Amino acid sequence: MATKVFINLPVKNLEASIKFFTTLGFSFNPQFTDEKAGCMVISESIYAMMLQEDYFKTFTKKPVSDAKKATEVLIALDAASKEEVEQLVAKAKQAGGNIYNEPQDYGWMYQHSFEDLDGHQWEIAYMDMSKMPTE
């Protein structure tokens, strides 16, 4: 059974992507970070590999999607509070990202979303399971 998750994302400018996500508060594992790839630590078992687009292409025979034109994946991360959701989205916008959806408040779940520099979509959500509807 798998114990770690690595999300691989193509990026046009690795240095800019590392700066963007560092500004949001993420760190990068230097063991797996070089001029072709950056290993962003999301949690103890979840990582996003930012791969320079030409390097990313060596792992697939299919064309690489342009995330600014088509959705390839939605990456959803949890947050500890509604305020943390808003803080992270605000940092993303200040760092050059785009807001692609208005915040949604379902009473038990609050989510807001941003696009990174390459157009990858990140959804940040706070869930209060004690308020989740039973039906």
Image (tube, grey):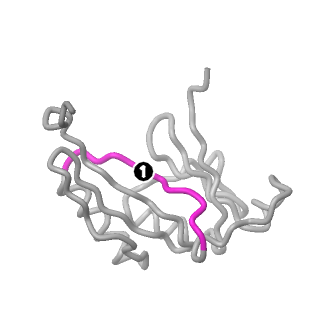
Q: Is residue 107 left or right of residue 73?
A: left
Q: Which image quarter holds the C terminus?
A: top left
Which residue sits at x=35%, y=70%?
101
Q: Is residue 38 left or right of residue 96?
A: right
Give SS at disc 1: strand
Q: Residues within 10 Å of mark 1 (few under 14, many from 20)?
A: some
The residue nearer to you, when weighing 22 against 58, is 58
Q: Quadrant of residue 66?
A: bottom right
Q: Which image quarter holds the N terminus?
A: top right
Which residue sits at x=39%, y=57%?
123
Q: Which residue is mark 1?
A: 76
Q: Amino acid at mark 1?
A: Ala
Residue 100, x across and y down, in percent: 39, 73
What segment carries the magenta color? 70-81
Residue 124, x across and y down, in percent: 34, 55
Q: Is residue 73 magenta?
A: yes
Q: Is residue 132 magenta?
A: no
Q: Is residue 116 left or right of residue 71?
A: left
Which residue sits at x=25%, y=60%?
104
